[in-house]
Image: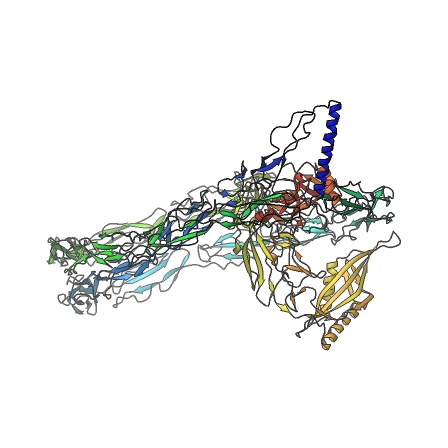
Amino acid sequence: MRLHVFLLTVVLFLSLTAVDGWRRRRRRRCPVVNCRWSGWSLGTCSASCGGGTAPCSRTKSPAASCGGADCSGPATSRCACTGPNPCQNGGQRASSGCSCPAGFIGSCCQTRISCPAITAPTNGGNSGCTTYSCGMTFSCNSGYELSGNSAITCQSNGQWSGSRPSCSRVRCPDLSAPSDGTISGSYYYSDVVTFGCSTGFSLQGDATRTCQADKTWSGSQTTCTRKSCPTLTAPANGGIQGTSFLYTDVVSFSCNSGYELSGSSSRTCQADQVWTGSQPTCSRKLCQELSSPANGQVTGGHAYGDVTTFSCDTGYELQGDVRRTCQANQQWSGAQPACSRNACPVLDPPPHGAVQGGHLYGDTATFSCDAGYQLSGTAAVTCQDSQAWSDTPPTCDRKACPAASDPTNGQVSGGRLYGDTVTFSCHPGYELQGSATAVCQADQTWSQDEPSCQLVTCPVLQPPTNGQMTGGNSYGDKVTFTCDPGYELSGSRERSCQANKQWSGAPAVCQKVQCPTLSAPQHGSSTGSAFFGDTLNFGCDTGYELFGSSGITCQADQTWSAAAPSCRKIVCLALPPPLHGQVTGGNEYGDTAVMTCDEGFSLVGDVTRTCQDNKQWSGTQPTCQRKSCPQLSAPDNGAMSGGVLFQDTATFTCDPGYELVGSASRLCQANQQWSGTQPACQKVQCPSLPPLSDGQMTGGSRYGDTVTFSCDDGFLLVGSSERSCQADRQWSGTQPSCQRKQCPQLSSPDHGAVTGGNHYGDVVTFSCDPGYELGGSGSRTCQADQTWSGTEPTCTAISCPGLDAPLNGNKVGGNSYGDTVTFSCTAGYQLTGSSTLTCQHDQQWNGTQPACTRKECPLLPVIDHGVSTGGRLFGDSVTFSCLPGFTLQGNQTRLCRADQTWSGTQPSCRRISCSSLPPPTNGHVTGGVMYEDAVSFTCDEGYELLGSQTAVCQADVTWSSTTPTCQKKSCPVLDVIPDGAVTGGHLYGDTATFTCSAGYQLVGDQYRTCQANQTWTGLQPFCQKKCCNALTVENGVVTGHTCFNNTVSVSCDVGYSIVGDSKLTCTEDGVWDKPAPTCKKICCDETLTIANGSVVQTGDGGLCFGNIVTFSCNTGHQLVGGAAATCQEDGTWSALPVCERVCCSEVGVIRNGQSTTTESCYNDVATFSCAPGFRLVSRGDVVCGADGTWRGDVPFCEPDNLCSKDVLANPNDGYKVCYSAATGGEDKEFCTMHCNPPKSYGLGRVVTYQCGDHTSWLWMTRVSNLLKLVSVSACQDPWNPFAMIMIGGLTITSTTSPNLHQIRHYIRTELLRQGLCLPPCRISDISVDAGVRTRRRRDISPLTVIDITIQLYIEDNSQLSLQTNTLPADVDALIRKSALDIKTALTSGTFHVPINGENLTIADTGAALSDPVIGCPVGFLEKVTDSGCFACPPGSFHTPCPKTVSPCPVGTYQTNSSQTSCQSCPEGTTTSAEGTSDPSQCKEYSDCNCGPNACVPTSQGWMCQCPTGHIQQDDKCVAIIECPLGSRLFRDTCYLVSNTTATYRAAGETCRQHGGLLAMVKDKDTQDFIMENYSGKDMWIGLDDRLTEGEFLWADGSSLDSFTYWTYGEPNDGGARIRSQDCVHLWLAAQQRWDDTSCKSKRFYLCQIGKQT
């Protein structure tokens, strides 16, 4: 109504003005004004995104007057505009809406194109998605292989890039039938092949084999082996030919020489495992009976092998063979003997003696001995009628010298008979004085006097400097070395004098002892060394003063004369705060006191004052004055009232027709900023319209605005297309809706069916009847244009796998569903298995593949005296052969034919014959000439046979021996005399002549003659040696005999070698064959070298016995063995060292990988590999250096962008529940840990691990709002609540700073030792806290005051309740008594705590006992689900206040439960995650080893996660004391902006590498500082809600506080459709207010780095 009145007023005013103007024009001429248009004013754009049109209007400004030209053209039109929303998914703005990239549709390109659903192939599976650019991967079940595409992709046209593949059974390699066997079956997956054997053969191995999924056959190769017959043995006195007793084998029998066969000569093994014929036997042949000799007798049988014995009457002796044997050729061995007169055996002279006389009955033989020998026995013997001598012949024994005795400390060895040599030697440590040998002479005396043994001595040793020595220097003596106080011995403490006159061990040296190394006091320095007698002086840095001795001395017991001092900061007097202000900060040297004012006041003067080394503060004291706020202005169409001082309120109002938007009042605050926001007066607004499902609406919501509605593709608008905001704040028209369009109904394919709806977006699915498969689209989707995607599918008959014709066979038929295949075999083969197979609807045949096996011929008979080999299947041939001595008559081979008959006729074997042998000259031959016949040879009277007496006809048509000869008889061949010779024949009448070798002379008969009775005349002579003179050699020893051909040996003394021959021989004329040698000093090899090193000579005298050389090695090598070698007595060097390559220690482990180095020595290169799911990122070779350390950057294992749930362990006695979810614009994997009831998870809360791109593809969990690597904890058993009591008011006072952990440990151990808390009493916790009490006198050190609190608890089986807190009376009494006993013992004055050399006592400074309560003691947590407790698990520590349990930090571990601290890993090692319970997980990692600081994965590998204000240097976190170049300082924090853009994650990594975090804007002052100094860039700050949607956390894990600076409408997570904006940036377009956006976008970033003072 007001608007109407206003318009009427304007019209009346204009009317009056026009009338008045007309009147004035009549009086005077007015100035001409031409009309002008104002600029176009746009209405609401028709498009929600991209290009569109909007209603636009313009006004005449000014209008034409005084006859001026009017404006041409319309006042309203439609203009081009851009929708309020951006085109999505890479779409580009077009003249109308958005131009979408391939794969996206929709007005804003918001919809990704989908392809039809596709089913898995039969006997297979598929995985993937159906949206544009997604892939679908196909696989087959075990035993099937893929035919067609293994993967297809959804294309931009909504169609797949290929068709669905099929899965067919895999085929195994063809198997062959075993030799002499058959095979049947087919070769596809799960088929079974069956094996069989021919007659006479048995199966070895698997009778069936199955085709497996990996295209291999089960079982092993089958063979057919011949059956065996029972083992045959040779007949007694015969033999057997043939060692095999298998089917068709032939065994032949024969008799030993002298035996003849009765029975079958051969037998054949038949198919029924029975032999042909019968077992033969062998019987003896007979010889002609023999007659007795004249004057003698014969006894014995005359069958083969019998022996006849001949004997003579008394007084006669047998001449000839005493025995004759019946031989195999039925002839007697030897010749007929005769009987002649007896004779005694010819006597030989005794060694070294002679004999004279005959040897017939009644003859006497006389004996004598050589010089040096004496006769032992009867000197003469007589030949008796018994052909025996009257006595035994005597011997010539060597005469004996007196026994040689052992020298003292020595021994003698050797005989004492004539010619013997004795040798003298000394015990180790003694040396010989006199001759080492003596010879027993013919006169029974020794050639030399006996020597003696004297003790050896070693060189005299000297005591070491600063030490003493005791002991002698004779062999066996020991010298002991000791050092003066303050010195320690290096070398051998004891050395012994050895037999080689050398001392054992190494020289002793006394070196100063060393005290433990003391480090300089913190904030101080030290000078001096740590050896005995040295003084270590201490000083402090500027601002620190020394407490303790300024100088301490290293004592002889390796301890220091006093404890190391400490440096303590100088302390200034405390500063008072300014009026209306506060002061914060310490008062030690270097501390800065910061002055601040109360809210509403500002500081005037020095903001900070520093405590200086003169104990005075810098600067002057400031004051606080009130603040004022900036002047505010009234809003357009409104008014404002109020002041501008602190706590003043400004009030805002609007003109009629407007409403206030913003703060109605604003308060001037302490930060000189107004509370609230500046208000504005705006038109009234209609209520928000509900969103249009499946459509869009555009337009404003204020009075006069119009909202336009449109539907998404595939939907139709029903209702009003536009609605306007009316004056009554209501909308015109009704709310429209979008309904899905319909596609035409689809029909089923022949032999198939169709299911599904026909509205937009519906998917219909096609399927085929059994025996048919689908061709074309398996599914079709109703599209936005009311047409169906894809093409009309069809159902075609399926086919079975193709079948091969059997080997040696044929097949007929197809392989489509219902087809039948018929099999047949070629000539000579027969079908095994089914002759037909039919293709079934499951694409499998109804049976197994048949096979064609060879036909079998009848078994052939065995031929006598022959054998046959070969098979009897079609195509096999049998080959015949005869036994040795027989020849084949007939066909040698016969072939098995297709009609199962044999070719040819059966052959036979016939005996062969030899040619006749001639008789020997003067002899005869008798016997046959056929195979195995024997002939015998004999000689005329007076001759004897030379050669074989018999010969046998052999299988090769030759005789076993040639014709022998008959020769005259001979005498026994005479023995050759030692050292002599005999010449002449030995036939009857021949004479033998004896001679001696050079150097010998003959003793006895020189000639002997062969007589008719085949005996010799005379006696056997002998030869005796000649002798040489004795030898002597200087520096040497001669051993050995000195007669002809005797050799003496010359050896040299130790350290000498022989020059000349060491052995000399006595010649035939009694002189030595060579000059005597000499002894020369020994020298070692002068060309001595050492591989990979060098040799240096030390001292003078060359390289002879006793000299020393030293060794050194080349780069990269080290000496193994002694550094020196000595030339030894044998001319060789003592043990030589070697130069081995320097080896490095283990290269170490890398996270998620291992090193696989085979060698780790100089110049070797270490190799690494990664665990499954990780890939190796190399940074160059890692090489073992010459100093034994590895050179180069170790590679690291980078996750392979996969999150495997298998690598994340289950808690013991528990399980994990895993799931996938999309948060923050990315897909993530989550696993939550659970325990089996009634156990509780050890970390006392629900722990969820997550993995994805945001965790670098590693499993992490939240700890203090930060994602960390944490080992999976354990599930803990429940406990009933405990009775607990506290003991407090205990104090220890010390002048030093004792180790609190040692105090805690000692008190616990001593209380348990004294039995003051025995079960069920338990010590839960001993709390030890220290403080410093300053003394009044500055020259007295401050005191350390230590407060002790002890918690006890009682293990009680009763069900105590946390709710009632009521203890049974006995439990209450027990725990009170235990606590009282401990309090009394600790405060008695006799309980001493020995720490730092002091016996500290515990004082009662108000000691008191709390009332017993029911609860969970330290080390236990309360259960959440019910009343009870559970123990904090291994790998964690309990913080009593607040009652929390935390995983052990990186670099620590804890093996026990219920602990309040964790143990540190050994120096140089760390752990890969928090929560470690196993100390073996403390490892020396090569890729990152930051000790107590965690290592985190980055794009450059594993890096140290240093605390803020620290930066990584050589695996250590070093404090940053200066701001980085280019940064700006604000509140002790350095701010550094990047010059390049990066994703949110990469930006955070870079800030951490600089020792900081992404900037955290936690208050308005910081926001203002950033806006003033970095206003030109759009930057990331350290704020995100990536972990939990809507829960924003700062980069240090802290929660978002009250201060925020969001731009209007933020955060909105990208709106309802995007939901992927989780990271915050300072939005340049919004005056650097906060906005959430995609973390993957790239922007500049701001780092904050805390500078350490």
Q: Residue furthest bottom?
A: 1369
Residue toward you, 540 or 408: 540
Q: Is residue 132 or residue 683 the one in the foreground?
A: 683
Q: Quadrant of the N terminus?
A: top right
Location of the C terminus (image quadrant): top right
**Residue 823 image position (x, y, % from top left):** 22, 55
Location of residue 1355 in the rendering, given as x and y in whole percent from the top left corner = 68, 71
Residue 1652 visible in the picture: no
| Residue 878 in the figure: left or right of residue 376 | left
Residue 668 in percent (x, y) is at 80, 46
Q: Say which of 922 and 526 sits in front.
A: 526
Left or right: residue 165 compared with residue 1210: left
Q: Is residue 1516 visible?
A: yes
Q: Position of residue 85 (x, y in %)?
A: 59, 42
Q: Pick whichever, 488 or 1552, lies toward us.
A: 1552
- The number of callouts visible is 0
The colour scheme used to paint the residues is rainbow
